[in-house]
Image (cartoon, helix red, strand yellow):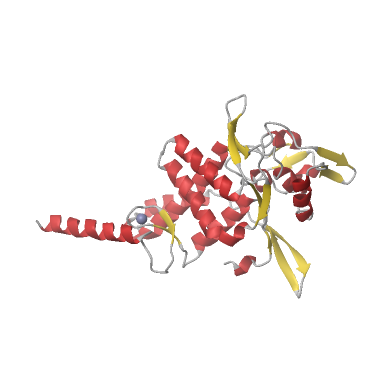
Amino acid sequence: MKHFFEHANSHWVRYSDYEITEDENKVTYINPANDAIPEIYDPLKDVENMVLDAVNIGQMSIGKRPKIDVEMAVLDFVKKYGLLGIMTAIPTTAEFMNYDTVYLTRNPVIDADSMPTDKYMEYFFPFGQPDMIKSQNGVTLNISGDVSMMALTLTMSDRPVAFGAEFQKEYAERIDWIIRIMRDLSFVFITSFLYYNDFEKLSDSQKDIYRKSIAIFDGIAPTYHVELLDTPTMVWDFNSLLTVIRTMFYLLLTDKKTPLRLCKHCQEPFIASRPSAVFCSPACKNRYNVYKSRGRNKGEE
Ligand SMILES: [Zn+2]
């Protein structure tokens, strides 16, 4: 699977610290903390654990865990991997900042086909817009004076300008949007797991419901371009961390030997270290066997 995306523009930015901030309408956002420092990393390196963390947060939300617990888990996730980059994940092109109107793909957070670009950006810059310079050649970011930002922008110079905006300290994402996206992932995972696990026991109409509930989710695919390396090579462009998570999630889900599984005992998602693993831990395996033998003894009484 990693081989498939051997050549990829998947680099992402995470800050050294993030915080939860409320705007005047009591909407809560996650944004980089005031004195936080940006750092570039490659999310494809440890992608299975990142997908697992996202699915787990979705599970917490579906399982009606207290809101504060779910929000703290999201904050931990963002501190580990950075914000999702929803702003570049849902438009039809990551170059949307060069146009007056942004067109949106079907997505779980904004229910509109299109809107003025500046209005769209207000969703992600609730506490102040980034410093932009408009010229004949399009839009650029004014980052003069900020050394860490200049280094970062240089590294990302071949990516759309919206990326640069997304990596500014002013960029924020609504926490309920992040949770909704992770719930969707988790829902798809649980549904597909149960579908195959309970296949024999399901009626035809139940199977139909399972199939339809999976079909309502769109995949946002990475784009690609060709580079003349040793040979002509397809280079995959991931337009956001969310695109990395979703693409890898679906690859894991559709891989016959998927390491992403639901523990037979505690029902928590886990990454299997061996092909035959059905329990997340030896402890769960033991508990399962104890319950099973107790259940059997009861039945015999
Ligand atoms: Zn378990």
Q: Where ligand 1 lies, by image quadrant?
A: bottom left
Q: Is 150 situated left or right of 70 in this image?
A: right
Expressed as whole percent of the image width and height from the top left, the position of residue 105 reads 65, 46
Expressed as whole percent of the image width and height from the top left, the position of residue 137 reads 88, 46
- Residue 119 vs 82, above or below: the answer is above
Expressed as whole percent of the image width and height from the top left, the position of residue 130 reads 76, 37
- Residue 168 vs 249, above or below: the answer is above
Location of the C terminus (image quadrant): bottom left
Expressed as whole percent of the image width and height from the top left, the position of residue 21 reads 60, 32
Q: Residue sitting at 60 percent across and 41 percent down?
A: 18
Outermost residue toward the right in this view: 136
Image quarter for residue 298? bottom left
Q: Is 227 situated left or right of 65 in this image?
A: right
Q: Residue sitting at 52 percent across and 51 percent down?
A: 215
Q: Nearer the viewer, residue 71 or 100?
A: 71
Q: Residue sitting at 61 percent across and 43 percent down?
A: 17
Image quarter for residue 126? top right
Outermost residue toward the bottom in this view: 230
Outermost residue toward the top in this view: 24
Q: Is 257 situated left or right of 110 in this image?
A: left
Give the number of callouts: 0
